[in-house]
Amino acid sequence: MKHNKLPYLGAWLIGLSQSFSFNATAADYTGGQLSNPKITAAGVVVPDGARLLASQCFQCHGTDGKSTTGIDSLAGESQAELINEMREMKAKTKADLMHYQAKAYTDAQIQLIAAYFASVSGGGTSHHDD
Amino acid sequence: MNDISRRKFLKTLGLSLGATALPISFAKAALRPRVIVVGGGFAGATAAKYLRLWSNNTVDVTLVEPNAVYYSPILSNLVLSGQKQLSQLGFKYDTLAQKYGITVTRSTVNSINSANRTVKLANGKTLGYERLILAPGIQFKAIPGLDETKILHAWQSGNQVQQLRQQIQAIPNSGTYVLSIPKAPYRCPPGPYERACVIADYLKRNKLGAKVIVLDGNPDITVERDTFNAAFTSTYAGIVEYVPNTILQSVDSAKKVAITSFGDYRADVLNVIPPHQAGGIVLNSGLANSSTGDWANVNPLSYESTAVKGIHIIGDSQGTGQPKAGHIANAEAKVCADAVLRLLSGSQPFAAPMTNSACYSPISATTASWLTAAFAYDPASQTMQLVPASYGASSGASTSNYRKMFEWANSLFGDTFA
Ligand SMILES: Cc1cc2nc3c(=O)[nH]c(=O)nc-3n(C[C@H](O)[C@H](O)[C@H](O)COP(=O)(O)OP(=O)(O)OC[C@H]3O[C@@H](n4cnc5c(N)ncnc54)[C@H](O)[C@@H]3O)c2cc1C
């Protein structure tokens, strides 16, 4: 597989250089730090951003990781297993959509995402076997 | 809102009570904060759903949308080739209303009073908000001579797609279909090339000697160049003629002639996708403050306008430079919904949001390709930046991708509308 050449990113990136003028500084956002995920027994309340990060998987894996199509569910999977799968996909260079997506996330982010899905009850039965 | 209900509200959001001062508008507001979402496409529908879901229904959400049924532009090229019926791409708002308790109001927002925090609807009603989310998609810029009733864009799905299908079916043998692509940024980067392929495939099988001429306002195929170049020069050799750097100057709508920087192109079917800008409500409300004046600059942590406080813009109308596409519109909507709930409770948006994009493109009646990327917030530039290692495309088109395309689309439709 040939990686699409970066010059063709043109259309996607126009405007990225536009400047923004909002006032908040990084210090204002300490509430959104990546450390110390707080996941309740119900698994719903994850105030530190784990839920938001995990929600970026919902487009394909279903709301809360409960798939309604042939794509795998992630809800209720073990945290360790999800972390391993993501790490494996990050390491490989396979022309697979999810392998590219995996490469976008740091290990810390992967742990949060996996923690969120592990905390969702009534999870799916399907299982990623890459 | 009294202290007990406020504490309850914060608790359901999972946010600490450490946060103090509530925004004035919120303190003054009725017991439950009100969020109005304008536009029920991929961006707006997702935002409305997740505001309710993530607030445990403690926030009142009104979705204002004029159409009873939303027709997805995603997969709409398959309607042109007869592989999908338009009705299969239609989504009603009943599930969002019933399952999540969203108030769906069938009307158009005509104007915004940001000082009073109200919007005025076409039906005469005025609604108040603590936070306003605008997700109106795109509108087209004028092209001299272009009569939209004769020369279709079919770029917002719905009726125009059905009409373009009929025009294409009526192309004679040896006839010509001409597609004009605007300069980027336009909605769905691979979309126009995908359309050229799907129509070439239909003509190849049904109309002897018919041709596709692609007039591209861009200097080259903007994305998935290897895949589309192979399709144009090999799969559809002798059918597709690709002409880069061709700026459409005007149109003779009666004679179906595209007048371009490279000369005139006469067509049996002329399909013009005009250059885009943000939806009318964004432009008319002074929110299109990008350098070109076409898009709304926002803080990508919350999608709040950099021009007017309390108004957020998501989806194709925003100007962060992320691609204008439905999958990532859904992604932006979640970042926005999460931030709005935090802001309503006096807390700050999450500091490190991620978004992602995926496009599947049918190349023929049995094959498809894909393109994907993820974006991460960069605190130094305060922008969303592409994560280079996440940017990739399929190696050409395949039948397995064609099957996966429907799994992907159905999942996205479900996460957005159900
Ligand atoms: C052929 C084609 C293929 C595509 N393929 C893909 C793909 O593979 N992947 C992908 O991610 N994207 C794809 N897209 C792009 C995608 O469809 C758009 O980017 C997406 O629809 C944008 O979502 P939105 O919510 O911003 O706008 P829209 O979907 O346009 O929704 C806007 C809504 O707002 C409403 N509205 C506007 N103004 C007002 C107002 N004043 N008051 C009330 N309501 C209002 C409109 O009625 C409309 O329902 C494709 C597009 C096309 C044309």
Image (cartoon, grey):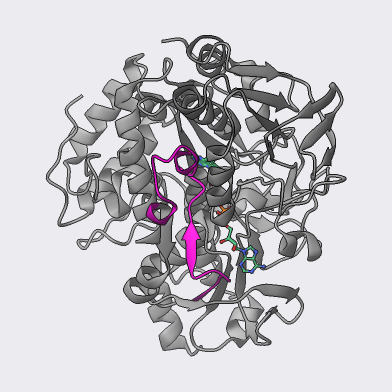
Q: Residue at x 46, y 35 (%)?
A: B358
The answer to whether any part of residue B373 appears in the image is yes
Q: How many dots with numbers?
A: 0
Quarter of the C terminus of chain B within the rendering: bottom left
Q: Is residue B71 left or right of residue A83?
A: right
Check residue B73 for magenta coloring. yes
Residue nearest the viewer, comparing B153 with B183: B153
Q: Position of residue B93 (x, y in %)?
A: 42, 69
Q: Position of residue B52 (x, y in %)?
A: 41, 70
Query: Among all residues in the image, which is located at the extreme left?
Result: A125
Residue B228 sits above or below residue B359 on the image: above
Residue nearest the viewer, comparing B295 with B338: B295
Check residue A79 for magenta coloring. no
Q: Is residue B60 left or right of residue B318?
A: left
Q: Which residues are magenta?
A: B61-88
On the image, which quarter does residue B102 sit in?
A: bottom left
Residue nearest the viewer, comparing B294 with A91: B294
Q: Residue at x 66, y 18 (%)?
A: B242
Q: Residue at x 54, y 21 (%)?
A: B224
Residue nearest the viewer, comparing B375 with A4: A4
The answer to whether any part of residue B47 appears in the image is no
Residue B9 sits above or below residue A54 on the image: below
Q: Position of residue B27 (x, y in %)?
A: 59, 83
Q: Is residue B33 left or right of residue B404?
A: right
Residue B69 sits above or below residue A13 on the image: below
Q: Position of residue B138 (x, y in %)?
A: 67, 52
Q: Residue at x 67, y 32 (%)?
A: B179
